[in-house]
Image: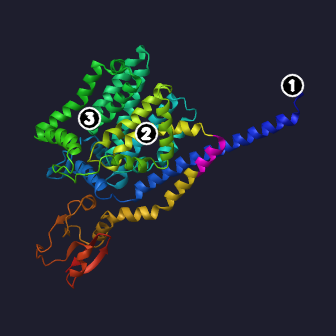
Amino acid sequence: MNISDLPASTFTAEATTGRHEAAAVRHAVRLLIAVVVLLLVYRVVLMWTLPLADTTEARYGEIAQLTVTHGFWLMPHIDPQTPFFAKPPLSTWVAAASMAVFGVNEFAARLPSLLASLATMLIAMAFASALQIRRRWLVLPVLMSCPLFFVSAGAVMTDAVQMSIVIAALYTAWRAIDAEPAQRRRWQLAFWALVGVGALSKGLADWALIGLPLIAYALLEGRPLQIFLRLFNWGGVGIAACIFVPWYAAAEHAYPGFLNYFIVGEHFSRFLIPGWKGDRYGIAHSQPLGTIWIFWIAAMFPWTGVFVTSFMRFVARVRSVSSLERFLWGATLAPLVFFTFAHNIIWTYGLTAVVPFSVLVARWLERLSEQRLRIASYGLMVLSLAALAAEPTIARNVKGNSDRDLVAAFHHVAPADAVLEYHVPPVYSPHFYAPDHVRYVPSGQEAETGMPRFVVVANKDLKSQPATSQLLFEGTRHSLVEEK
């Protein structure tokens, strides 16, 4: 049959169907863009309104505040008398610099994590472009809908800065491996510079999170020596050393014993010894082997099904997929497999795996049919609206783990030189919100001053307070009492 013999109605119907499908795709695209904007705005609002919660956020916030107010720029301090050997200073430096510019407040403390996460988004888009994803921005709704990425993007923790460095290093490594010889050197130097910066972020942990995916990729490719030679550069090694060695040397000189605690304790004992007792600043987390996969399921929700099906498909045809896809799977799986055999882990340890996986999910989204893409976009919008609806619950829980409101009640009624006496060991949030006012005075050791005293007690001890006491604030864990 000649095409000219077909009735005109055939072409009209096909054109109408094509227009309907294109309109449906545009609608789904608009919904996905709306999800990104909505979740980004929501993340910024939470950064601005929520208090720093104990223990992690308030601890790192207080360390940054001490850096600004006491000048602890060489070695971060957990209190004015105690140096903080657990982490190198990069995350503290950027948080302290933000506070120096914008003031000591929650948003300033959290801003570096947001900026690091935005930079990571751009790198994820660059990976998506290299994977020939036409709508490379599809990585954005994937990342913002992953709970671990969303939380880390606006929290006072070391993880967002670490993530941005690791992902940037992996991207420059990929470009160095894939580049023509004339272009390779600049990518090599950029890679090694990031290796040096990583040593100032989390030390050997960053090197492991950079190196393990590259080792996994080299093994998948079956050409480890060639890949090593494409990455190695003596000049780059020199740049890396010039970036991190001066600080490590100065820190050990000023604080003898730092290197032993940080290198041996934090990098080996912490992960190899269940319930490690040498932790000076917190509690060792003894988890059953393999717990990282439970954390991972929660971290990447709602993309669990995509992970399982895509991984099975990858295993079935690993030799026929593109080299970059093998690289991204190596970057996704290597940290998860590594932490499978560690007892002392927390839920954020899978963060660097979220980013390469988001690129694979973005490609999956782009390949969906018009109907399935529309379903996915509606599903993400529903989840986003549910997250917004959960804001009162989130705020209540975070406030319950912070003494910000208690300190505000204290400042409202107390003289400027008043002391806030804690009859329970204070954590970190009172030190952040009431610097130079907090004193730990165990119950029974109160000083008789003859002046009104402002005392913090555990809620369970409220009934035992003197009859002359006045309750000023009652929180979920601590209460503020004025004793006259």
Residue under label 2, please give it. 355
Instruction: State the CA–CA distance, disc 2 to disc 3.
Output: 21 Å
- Figure check: 408 above or below 86: below
| Residue in the picture at 18% in, 38% down | 263
Name which residue type carries label 1. Answer: Met
**Colour scheme employed for the rendering of this structure:** rainbow
Give the number of the mark in front: 2 or 1. Answer: 1
How far apart marks 3 and 1 lie (CA) works out to 70 Å
Does label 2 or label 3 sit earlier along the sequence?
3
Q: Is residue 121 magenta?
A: no
Q: Main secondary structure of the magenta part?
A: helix
Is residue 81 shown above or below 234?
below
**Label 1 sits on residue:** 1
| Residue sticking out furthest to the front | 316
The span shown in magenta is 369-378
Tag 3 residue: 199
From the viewer's perspective, is 462 left or right of 382?
left
Q: Which of the two labelled residues, at mark 2 and mark 1, occupies the earlier sequence position?
A: 1
Looking at the image, residue 84 sits to the left or right of residue 153; the answer is left
Q: Is residue 15 above or below residue 45?
A: above
Question: Looking at the rendering, which quadrant does residue 215 occupy?
Answer: top left
